[in-house]
Image (cartoon, rainbow, N blue to C red):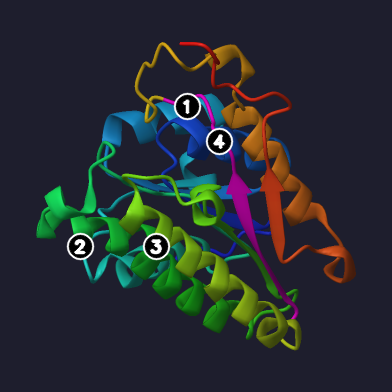
């Protein structure tokens, strides 16, 4: 095991770009060492470079969260490198383009559920098991989606997986308090990332930005235990959908 660092350690999934990268940068600015997880080594290397963290204060873990053993491998690698884990941000998500349920294939169905629900549940369980034993407890932020509430057509499985993550977080909230572990679920509205394709009906200037979501995550990380929300919804100030088109 590497020498345990004095500063706190955060693990961010989907850290290679977009929201995950913005969260990683905010955590680095707040003094956290980082475990950065995603599928692209090039994107993770760029995120690490942007944080300015040295290799002993940052770890790149290539992982596909659709794989059943990915959560165990990710937590093990993080603890082996740092010796502790103070913040887990389950940010990684995946969905294909909007597709009617009857046209959705089994492979896409399984991947949606694995990445958006199974992996965050497993990572939360593994992280909480460690946090419960260490001084200071920890914080877990699950990034869901407004789709869990507005259930858009063509996203039935994705909406169900994110709704499951919301319910899971609510169930853990009271359970974790005795271990000094905060847990919250974040429900972002439309956010301007590469995952949302170009659409003439969308005014992207009115969408949320990855920095907005990172700020919401940091508000949870910094919240005193008694004021930590179980659920936090972040919506654009104005509807990005253009009318009359």
Tag 1, which secondary structure?
helix
Q: Earlier in the sequence, mark 4 or mark 3?
A: 4
Q: Which residue is situated farthest in the front direction here?
A: 244
Q: Residue at x 24, y 59 (%)?
A: 66
Judging by the rendered image, the residue that carries numbered circle 2 is 110
Judging by the rendered image, the residue that carries numbered circle 1 is 49
Tag 2, which secondary structure?
helix
Q: Is residue 11 above or below residue 3?
A: above
Is residue 8 shown in magenta?
A: no
Distance between the alpha carbons at the discs numbered 2 and 3: 11 Å
Distance between the alpha carbons at the discs numbered 3 and 1: 33 Å
Q: Is residue 107 left or right of residue 127?
A: left
Closer to the eye: label 3 or 1: 3
Mark 2 closeness class: few <14, some 14–19, many ≥20 residues within 10 Å: few
Q: Which residues are magenta?
A: 180-193
Tag 3 near tag 1, CB within 8 Å:
no
Judging by the rendered image, the residue that carries numbered circle 3 is 161
């Amino acid at each position: 095991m590497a020498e345990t660092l004095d500063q706190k350690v955060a693990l961010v999934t989907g850290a290679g770009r977009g929201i995950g990268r913005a969260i990683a940068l905010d955590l680095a600015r707040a003094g956290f060492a980082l475990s950065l997880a995603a599928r692209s080594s090039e994107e993770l290397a760029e995120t690490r470079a942007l944080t300015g963290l040295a290799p002993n204060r940052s770890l790149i873990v290539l992982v596909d969260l659709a794989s059943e053993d990915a959560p165990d491998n990710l937590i093990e690698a993080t603890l082996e490198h740092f010796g502790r884990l103070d913040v887990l941000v389950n940010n990684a998500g995946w969905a294909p383009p909007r597709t009617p349920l009857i046209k959705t294939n089994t492979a896409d169905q399984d991947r949606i559920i694995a990445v958006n629900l199974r992996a965050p549940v497993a990572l939360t369980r593994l992280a909480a098991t460690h946090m419960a034993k260490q001084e200071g407890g920890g914080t877990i932020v699950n990034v869901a989606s407004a789709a869990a509430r507005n259930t858009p057509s063509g996203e039935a499985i994705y909406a169900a997986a994110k709704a499951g993550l919301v319910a899971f977080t609510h169930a853990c909230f009271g359970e974790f308090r005795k271990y000094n572990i905060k847990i919250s679920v974040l429900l972002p509205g439309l956010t301007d990332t590469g995952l949302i394709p170009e659409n003439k009906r969308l005014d992207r200037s009115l969408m949320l930005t990855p920095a907005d979501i990172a700020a919401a995550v940091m508000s949870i990380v910094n919240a005193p235990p008694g004021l930590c929300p179980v659920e936090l919804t972040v919506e654009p100030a104005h509807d990005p959908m253009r009318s009359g088109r």
